[in-house]
């Protein structure tokens, strides 16, 4: 018994590379968007300051990479995959051709084949208003979304993808079937587990240990076969080179269920290959509105509001200071003076013991009320 679903030569040539490579001045076929790749934002009047100074171009922010095109020389272009980006930030630079007016620039540090590349994309529009606007915000936002959605694109072994015996579903992911009692043949004794088939990937995890699992997007599947093994008919899945080149074997009983699952995987793999979902959803207009709202809220928070403060009543403060100062001053004089000026203690009937005489103008009750009896706030 042998049934096979394998990629054609054209599909092999179209392996996902856009997010994992850095390319310079590539032919048009490499700057053309692949299936499922979308332009999420376009930033105009951008110069590649390091490689092509003086050439005005535009920066395309897609769900897989950043593309820069020169509008002066069509053959000059750059393609920077998000997986290769190590660091990004913005800075102000002074353009020599603009009277040394400061302009906003995007700095990117990329790593490819153990080589470090630095890119500087500068705004050359000359518009003063753009200097204070986050014109490169979409680059940071989409790069962050890319890092959070790797399960849509990359194979993952022993990941935190299962919780309480249930697969953690990704956004826009739909579960089509779930098969219990699937043996993973990666070891001699085999491991019993569960198969979950969705519109984005197939997942297997062991019943005894949920951390022993595999998440395999259809994008990383090179071929699917049913072939004979020493355990009987088995489902054999080969991953692409970008997915590690693994050979995975699974045994599913009965054979009829194995055939049904094979047909389902073939169908879903074909559909997904034609229109893949890379998991990134981004609306630049909505993002700009959120940034503007946050900036306005921060500006309002920094404004000084008199209503937020309560005015202190000076009469209360004078009352407190007068009582304390008068009483303590007399006590201090007693300490600083000689022993002859120290007053003799007298017996207090109310307290039942001897004490220093109370100063003139004060009552015994005043000793228990250091602060004023009424602390009301006087509002104008």
Image (tube, grey):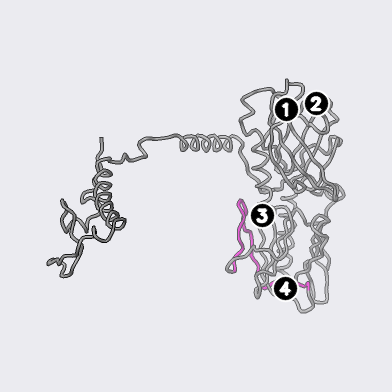
Q: Give the labeled residue for mark 3.
A: 199
Give the numbered dot on residue 94: 1
Could you tell me which secondary element the residue under label 2 belongs to? loop
Q: Give the labeled residue for mark 2.
A: 55
Query: Distance of mark 2 from mark 3, alpha carbons?
Result: 43 Å
Label 2 vs label 1, nearer the camera: 1
Query: Is 42 in front, or is 10?
Result: 42
Label 2 crowding class (10 Å Cα cut-off): few <14, some 14-19, many 20+?
some
- 125 above or below 191? above
Image x and y of residue 103, in percent: 69, 28
Q: Specify the segment rendered in magenta.
A: 165-186
**Farthest bottom residue in view:** 189
Label 3 crowding class (10 Å Cα cut-off): few <14, some 14-19, many 20+?
many
Asked if the residue under mark 3 is in contact with the one under mark 2, i.e. CB atoms within 8 Å, the reply is no
Sequence-wise, the earlier of marks 3 and 4 is 4
Q: Is residue 376 left or right of residue 174?
A: left
Image x and y of residue 242, in percent: 81, 54
Asked if the residue under mark 1 is in contact with the one under mark 2, i.e. CB atoms within 8 Å, the reply is no
Could you tell me which secondary element the residue under label 4 belongs to? strand
Give the numbered dot on residue 183: 4
Quadrant assignment for the C terminus: top left
Query: Is 327 in front, or is 26?
Result: 327
Quadrant of res 342: bottom left
Sequence-wise, the earlier of marks 1 and 4 is 1
Sequence-wise, the earlier of marks 2 and 1 is 2
Query: Distance of mark 1 from mark 4, alpha carbons?
Result: 63 Å
Label 1 vs label 4, nearer the camera: 1
């Amino acid at each position: 018994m042998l049934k096979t679903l394998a990629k054609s030569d054209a599909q092999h040539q179209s392996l996902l590379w856009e997010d994992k490579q850095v390319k310079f001045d590539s032919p048009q076929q490499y700057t053309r968007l692949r299936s499922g790749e979308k332009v999420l934002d376009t930033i105009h009047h951008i110069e590649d300051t390091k490689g092509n100074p003086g050439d005005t171009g535009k920066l395309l922010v897609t769900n897989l990479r950043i593309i820069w095109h020169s509008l002066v020389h069509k053959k000059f272009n750059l393609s920077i995959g998000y997986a290769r980006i190590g660091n990004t930030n913005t800075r102000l630079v002074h353009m020599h051709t603009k009277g040394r007016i400061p302009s906003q620039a995007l700095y990117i540090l990329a790593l490819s084949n153990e080589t470090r590349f630095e890119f500087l994309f500068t705004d050359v529009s000359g518009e003063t208003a753009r200097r204070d606007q986050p014109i490169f915000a979409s680059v940071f936002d989409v790069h962050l979304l890319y890092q959070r959605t790797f399960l849509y694109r990359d194979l993952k072994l022993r990941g935190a993808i299962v919780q309480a015996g249930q697969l953690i579903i990704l956004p826009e992911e739909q579960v089509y079937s779930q098969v219990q009692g699937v043996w993973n043949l990666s070891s001699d004794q085999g491991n019993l587990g569960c198969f979950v088939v969705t519109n984005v990937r197939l997942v297997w995890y062991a019943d005894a240990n949920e951390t022993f699992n595999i998440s395999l997007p259809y994008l990383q599947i090179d071929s699917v076969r049913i072939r004979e093994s020493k355990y009987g008919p088995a489902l054999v899945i080969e991953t692409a080179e970008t997915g590690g080149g693994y050979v995975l074997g699974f045994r599913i009983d009965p054979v009829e269920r194995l055939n049904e699952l094979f047909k389902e995987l073939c169908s879903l793999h074909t559909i997904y290959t034609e229109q893949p979902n890379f998991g990134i959803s981004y609306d630049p207009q909505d993002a700009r509105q959120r940034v503007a709202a946050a900036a306005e809220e921060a500006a309002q928070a920094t404004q000084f509001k008199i209503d937020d403060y309560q005015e202190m009543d000076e009469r209360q403060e004078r009352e407190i200071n007068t009582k304390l100062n008068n009483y303590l001053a007399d006590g201090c004089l007693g300490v600083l003076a000689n022993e002859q000026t120290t007053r003799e203690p007298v017996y207090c009937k109310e307290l039942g013991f001897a004490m220093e005489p109370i100063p003139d103008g004060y009552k015994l009750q005043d000793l228990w009320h250091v602060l004023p009896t009424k602390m009301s706030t006087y509002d104008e």
